[in-house]
Amino acid sequence: MAMEARTAFQNARSESRYKDAPVAGVSADDHADLYRQLWHECAGLTIKVPHLGDRVFYFPQGHIEQIKECLNDEDDTSIPNYHLPSKILCKVVDVELKAFPDSDEVFAEIGLLPDSEEGWGSISRSVPQKIPANSFRKVLTTSDASSHGGCCLPKAHVEKTFPPLGVQDPSEDQASQFLVAKDLVGATWYFQHIYRGNPKRHILANGWNKFACEKKLKAGDTCIFMRGLGPNEIFVGVHRAVRMQKRSTDLTGPAMRRGILVNAALAIDTRCPFTVIYHPRMCASAFVVSYDKVMEALKVNYSPEMGFEMLVDGGEDPEMKRFSGIITAKKDIDPARWPRSEWRCLKVQWDVTSSGQLLPLRVSPWDILPLGLDVSHMQLSSSVDRKRSMPFKHMIHYNPFSRTNENSESGGLQSQGLTLSVVNPGSSSCQDETILAEDR
């Protein structure tokens, strides 16, 4: 019986190679739409990536902080900021959502064009989902992640998301079908989906072991399953409980930080686009933020003891979690290099009930929702810091961070100095240098 099932699986897999043709009535845009939805499911529910044409602020301070997480080093405060303002008004000229082949960790390449015009109004393009995706998350058990056995799936989610198994013959002990699964890095996997047992369970059998081994899945990792467009097609993504080991790079932390700042300074000086790479798993907060979101947040006059709430990704939970706390201080962390910066300028204390979750000790104003606001807490006006970068007077004869090795096999790590993005919750500055409460 096992041999027959294995032979049938191999035959179905072989036939699938020839059936992987475009589905009638389904366009490439439809596939791209589902890919975007799967990417966001893997990135996290709170992750926001701008769309082409959006107006955003780029925070170089937040960008260079992220090197610490990737390289496990400390920031070098002797590196100048090359006369960069704390936030740079930009237009989004390119967005590519990708994943590393060796880890399935998602990242986004975002092309930005510095723009000094403040008066041309807000542009925030919402890209609607053409196809509402059915999906569910499964936290893997030790048995699911083992080299033998299969992956047991929840009945309710499978029946809502997977292609239907069809009418089962009452005389048969099980029903089965063969699924073609596509992941974020473009690979195709073949699973046998069976419904058997007493009580009956949905199981991914043949093909699952190969997937689990090649993806190096561990107990606690989460797999996201999403309905595809073809009759037996699904999409599968991976969200690891623990990030895989940091990537190797020939560049040191200081070199990468200099590259990030130099590229941004040159982009402002020449009015040319530059590219940043955003890694959601390495960031507690995005460093490319919607113009509207920032400007609305800066209308508030933040003060000690002000209550707030913040949404946090619920992990395997399909819903976001809401945590509350109070602001304890508003203070520049690096007043010498980034005076009056709003990046993570608020020191916070979380409610006792939030202690079970790893939460940042500093947040940016646009990361939180203030509670109980009245007129006294609203700024009379809020405008963009119009300070532009000073003329870049240093001639650069060699720039190792230019995009000369784009789309390399390592996910573009060595293509430029902007390719690593990791956030450490402990670096920020703010609009007001005065300490409003004792540091904690």
Image (tube, helix red, strand yellow):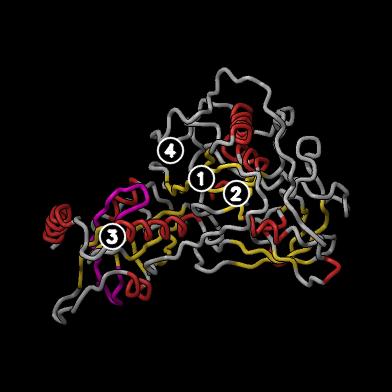
Find disc 1 in the rendering and name its residue: 110
Secondary element under disc 4, as helix, strand or loop, is: loop
Q: What is the CA distance from the residue labelled 4 to the residue labelled 3?
A: 27 Å
Query: Disc 3 residue type?
Result: Ser
The relative height of residue 9 versus residue 198 in the rendered view (above or below) is above
Residue 1 image offset from top left, x and y in percent: 13, 63
Q: Which residues are magenta?
A: 182-202
Secondary element under disc 3, as helix, strand or loop, is: loop
Return the disc, 4 or 3, that comes first in the chain's sequence: 3
Residue 206 image offset from top left, x and y in percent: 23, 57
Find disc 4 in the rendering and name its residue: 411
Report if the CB atoms under discs 4 and 3 are less than 8 Å apart: no
Return the disc, 3 or 2, that comes first in the chain's sequence: 3
In the picture, measured across the screen, residue 192 lies left or right of residue 118, that is left
Query: Disc 4 residue type?
Result: Gly
Residue 114 image offset from top left, x and y in percent: 60, 42
Find disc 3 in the rendering and name its residue: 27
Q: Which mark is residue 288?
A: 2
Report if the CB atoms under discs 3 and 2 are less than 8 Å apart: no
